[in-house]
Image: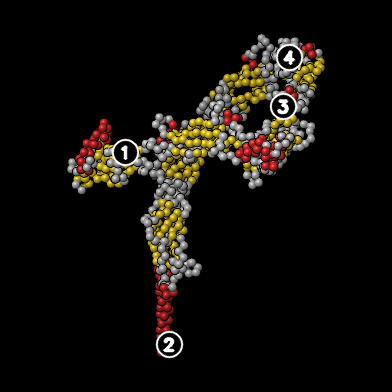
Amino acid sequence: MTPMVHLLLLPLLLSIAAGKDLEEKKGPLVNLMLDVAEWSPVPYPMYQFQVKHPGVTDFRLSGEGREDIKISKDGWLYLETPLDWSTQDHYILTVEALEGDVVVEGPAFVTINVLDVNNHAPQFSQGLYTAVVRENNAAGVAFTSVSASDGDDPKTPNAQLVYSLVSQLPNKENINLFQIDPVSGEISTTEEGQKLLKSREGIHYSRGEDRSTETLKTKFTDYCPVQKVPYEENPFFTCVENAEKRRRVIDPVNDPDYTLYVRVQDQSGASDTALSGNSIVHVVVQQNLWRNPGPIIITENLEEEYPLKIAEVQSNDPDAIYSLGQKERELSLFPFQITEDGKIFVTEPLNREDKDMYILVVFAKDVNNKEVDPPMEIHVSVEDVNDNAPVCAEEETVFEVQENEPAGSLIGQVLAYDDDQEGTVNSKLIFTFSSSMPPPSIFSIDAVTGNINALRSLQRKDQQIYTLNVQVSDPGFNVVCKVVIKVIDVNNELPLFEKNDYGSHSLAEDTPVGHTVVTMKATDDDEPESGSSVIEFHISAGNDDELFTVETDGKGVGHLVIAKPLDFETSPNYRLQIDARNPEPLMKGLEYGSESTMFVNISVDDVNEFPEFNLDIMELVVLENTTKGSVLLTVDAKDPEGKEIRFKLDGDSRGWLEIDAATGEIRTKDKLDREALESFEVTLTAFEKENPEMSSEHVLPVRVLDVNDNYPRLVETQAFICAGKPEPIIITAKDEDSAPFSQPFTFTLPKKSPNWDLKNVDGTSAKLSLKKTLTQDRTFMLSIDIKDNAGMGIPQPLEVRVCNCTELGYCYVAPEGRSFSYGLGPTIGILAGIIVFCAVVFIVVIKRKNKGKETGTDEEERLKK
């Protein structure tokens, strides 16, 4: 198709390509953003501009991608060649409507975003990976990893990669020994792999032992002591020798133990159209001699010869140097040590009651103090032996029981303890009676719990006190605990108040907490010093807010005191009901009555209280560019009596804030400046309008937040460079603003200069260098564009003089070129001095002349006489 035919048929082709979405792709000539998939078939219509001007004859397109993107005379913006996201992901163009050569509409800016399609398969960084894994490698701990990349847009699912393990060879038992992290590509062992992976059998060598053929012959002889065939002719020795050589130098590429096939997919592998790549991982399993011998159990106080060997470790590096540490905080005594060949010893007997567990940390390092195996934690448990006797909790245990309690009633529990290990037979205690008076047929004891029960009803008239000896035993020791049982009188008497109405009392609402309101008394005729005669006082009604409490020593005297601050406005009156009670239960059939209850009335008198603030903010934060008159905060305060209050504000030395006396609104009074004062405190006062002395104060911190109202400025605006040795100039700027509106600064020249080069040094300075060599003095006026971290800044003038310098590095000025003229200030001063001097001389001359005339006149008068 010729270009002319193509142009004639273009509107038809574009309409057909637009299809059903034709109307959706039309609109006015305005700024526009379009999304277009890469490699869309062409011609691909994107948008048709419809203009209102009737005389439009053509459209003009300018900007990026004009060789791929075109516009027709009727306003269709279309692709002439497919776009490639990997080449450019967006284009910015300008569209103008023309009448002839005159722009009648526009310009409109069009941004075309190229959308990525999934047309790049992920690729592994290597086609073949090799890895080494130790026996017993912890499950889930990576020993190697694979990685892949995708050429599609990383911000889209097209480049979101997921890894998977396709298969492992060999796998005769169909057990997966390896696993791969789908996101990171890290390869680790499974729990089965941790247990089942085995290396090729080999010979073990001790630290410093030679690994030569002669050493191998010696070890072979140790296993097979009768050898009649020479080693070189012995097929068994030759087999062992070859296997050992092969094990020492394993080729993971040609002789792996396992081969893993891994796959990577894009689109997270969740789509049927996801693309994939594959790779191979050869894995060699290495012998792991670094095995934990723990946990180790040592019997406490073991009678052996010390140091005593308790374990042995062996590094995978036969030349490793071993050391021993402790995981816990530094112990004053660490009774363990390790030898150079990995033998671990305990140096003295251990006591479980002092410490029942030790965590040893074994290190294996080379001669350069670098770890050759990961640190190993070994747990050492101290096994308990029965070396502690039971101990009574109390030197003498005393129980009280009321007479006439039924048979089987619990008297109490004997308490004892044993320092041997809890939960073992060594600390299992057995309770029995060793002797008693009267006979033990009156009481029984539970051998396991130590609970003592009465076998019959006890009477005070028969006996008031029983003394028992309880034997507490473990398998090797016993102790006797003394028990005293007191039979007390039955609680058959009620506590009685001396009066049931304690009258009315008035309290000011500011009466302090702890003040005694009234003292009450009650009596009980039960046996003194027993639980039946102890009297407790309980407020049973009228104290919902728990403003009052009763303090007592249990002997019948109670003090009603204030427990919380009173508030007339909350409740002005209280009627309290107070009951007298015994801690011991009453005798059956006996109940508390009104004689054990008293009432007291309390009235709270109003007091003129100070206003109270209700502010829940800790700090007032305000931007420094806040408009004058803006309301920052409304102060809330109330008077407990409901009186009208007013507000005032003090402490604002800058006069930036003011408060409305009636409403409490705090407003900006003037423009704030953080650079002048970043934080300060104001004192808010709330006072009664009619009685200003009744006031309360609240200190409010104010913090002024920075805005970007300062631009960076050069610290020095003049500099010089020696022409013979043009060293760079370091220019420095400063900004009164704080982060993020200050440094780091960017230093640039407004346009590329043939003479000067400017490079940033750090956040506040830059290096200005002279590109060319100059032979004569010359002064340059440069414009340095300095912007702060927020992009704010203006060009700064910098005067740079290029000159011939002295040996001291300063600009040289020839003698004939020196000027002895003074500045304006000194010149005026000199002229003024000359004028004053002339005036003084003139006055002196006049005075002398006048004086001469007077003298001549006097002489003439004298001669005449």
Q: Amino acid at mark 2?
A: Glu
- Judged from this view, the residue extending furthest toward the left is 55
* Residue depicted at 46% across the width and 48% down the height: 738
Helix, strand or loop at label 4? It is strand
Helix, strand or loop at label 1? It is strand
Disc 1/disc 3 C-alpha distance (Å) = 78 Å
Disc 4/disc 2 C-alpha distance (Å) = 154 Å
Place of residue 197 in the rendered image (x, y in percent of width and height, measured from the top left): 59, 32
Can you tell which mark lies on residue 34?
1
Q: Earlier in the sequence, mark 4 or mark 3?
A: 3
* Residue depicted at 52% across the width and 28% down the height: 568
Location of mark 3 (residue): 421
Q: Amino acid at mark 1?
A: Leu
Disc 2/disc 3 C-alpha distance (Å) = 141 Å
Location of mark 2 (residue): 859
Query: Of circles 4 and 1, which is in front?
Result: 1
Crowdedness near tag 4: few (<14), some (14–19) or many (≥20) residues, C-alpha within 10 Å: some
Left or right, residue 382 beside residue 655: right
Q: Is residue 756 above or below residue 667?
A: below
Query: Of circles 4 and 3, which is in front?
Result: 3
Place of residue 31 in the rendered image (x, y in percent of width and height, measured from the top left): 29, 41
Disc 4/disc 3 C-alpha distance (Å) = 29 Å
Q: Earlier in the sequence, mark 1 or mark 2?
A: 1
Query: Of circles 1 and 2, which is in front?
Result: 1
Which of the 4 image quarters holds residue 859? bottom left
Can you tell which mark lies on residue 453?
4
Which of the 4 image quarters holds residue 577? top right
* Closer to the camera in the image, 356 or 126: 126
Q: Earlier in the sequence, mark 1 or mark 3?
A: 1
